[in-house]
Amino acid sequence: MFPAAFDYEAPSTLTEVLSILKQRGDDAKVMAGGQSLIPLLKLRFAQPQLIVDIGRIPGLADIKRDDGHVRIGALARHVDIERSKELAKFVPLMVEAVHWIADPLVRNRGTLVGSVCHADPSGDWGSIMLALNAELIAQSSKGERVIPVDGFFQGPFTTTLRPDEVVTAIRIPVPAGTTGGSYHKLERRVGDFATVAVSVQVELNGRKVTKAGIGLTSVGATNIKAKKAEQALVGHELTDDVIAQAAKLAAEAAEPKDDTRGTAAYKKDVVRVFVQRGLKAALARAQEGKA
Amino acid sequence: MKVTMRVNGVERSGDIEPRVLLVDFLRSNLLLTGTHIGCDTTSCGACTVRIDGDPVKSCTVLAVQAEGREIKTVEGLANGAALAPIQVGFHEEHGLQCGFCTPGMMMVTSALLERNPNPTDDDIRWAISGNICRCTGYTNIVKAVQHAAKLTSAAAKAPAGKEAAAVAGGGE
């Protein structure tokens, strides 16, 4: 299969990228690793007139601590996350979850930022970013804008990113205190999209939850932040009853459809079970980390 | 547009449209048909080549993205007539039936053994999890990779000179 014809630019500076997007942003797609975009081009679901390949811009692949955050550049690949000592130490949820993303070959090229901007409701990183309350750093010729991932997804493959903008990094607030996370994914085989997946991150003070994040994959038109379930956890100890209540609220927030991977009712129930398992795993990790 | 890359150590270039995929550039322009096209949808790994050392699916890379990069394909494994240890492993352990997935499997293996010279069976299954063998010959593929790992580490320990003999001998 061949993509439809397109113009191709591979600038070596961000300034050039911004200038190209200012002029031709409406007709352009930005490409990092291309692991989501190239399949769409080949199937001709996407036919942009211009591809702006940002793969040759120096300095965009860094993963580093930055004032209470870990900042992950737009060219940091899944495999870089897998091998990152910073993330293993400060955001271990991401290093656990990365093994569920695509397959090892795709992880050698695909990027976190590209995956989030692609905004596939079946994407894994979207719900993990929602659970971690991550923010995107977008640049345009007018300057920089910080966009919370919560609210970024508007629908399938649709975000609030403007045509003249490019996301240069994602930053994740480093979870503080006693903290743990987990990612549970049901997939039919390696590399398949999730039937359902659930991301969970909690911060505890003593035994009580001070912050909670729950993100849902493949159960709606976007990755979903289960806010009522998060709120039901804050201020409480993670008892079986509290966990069961949050799991019920998260299942209610899911809006899955029947498809070849399962019925809507089944997927809602998997959300409920995965939130329970996820919170228990996150709690266990938080307590391990404390000891 | 003009694109230039090093393929198996040799500088190669071509004049192509930006939409040409790396796998098609390798097969159609350079006539390196050892790299196969299987699913053409980023699922099967038959098209696996190494770019700057990393195994990737060349059906999901534009040839222009490989500009200036170092590409390795299955044609780059053997040293003249002497099979590489990885090829010997697949030969000895019957690591292929129809052979269609084999170039991809071997390119993944070559990257795996560089990072991890003594892999467990689990490490191998993990490494090839993006490569599908439709004959379902995975058990023998894992054995083949283990065989290759043993040959490679033996060759690394052996004094120079004996290495080539051991590898060539294993291929008979």
Image: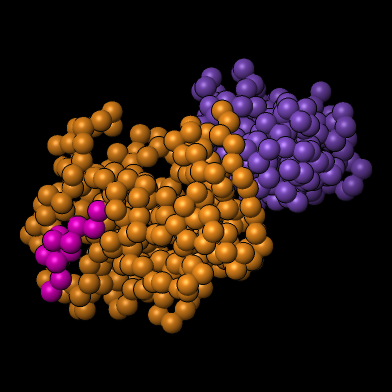
Scheme of image coloration:
by chain
**Numbered disc total:** 0
Residue A203 against residue A185 in the figure, above or below: below
Residue B20 vs residue A150: left or right?
A: right
Q: Which span of residues is magenta-colored?
A: A224-235
Q: Chain A's shade in the image?
A: orange
Q: Is residue B49 above or below residue A92?
A: above
* Residue B30 image position (x, y, % from top left): 78, 32
For the question of whether residue A290 can be seen, the reply is: no
Find residue A116 and report its horizontal and vertical position in percent.
41, 55
Question: Residue A58 magenta-drawn?
Answer: no
Residue B135 locus on image (x, y percent)? 53, 19
Q: Is residue A233 in the magenta section? A: yes
A227 displayed left or right of A161: left
- Asked if residue A93 shows in the view, the reply is yes
What residue is drawn where x is 26% and y is 45%?
A221
**Residue appearing at x 41%, y 60% in the figure:** A162
B34 above or below B66?
above
Above or below — where is B71 with respect to A54?
above
Judging from the image, what is the letter of the chain drawn in purple? Answer: B
Q: Quadrant of residue B80?
A: top right
Say which of B123 and A148 sits in front: A148
Give the residue drawn at x 44%, y 57%.
Answer: A163
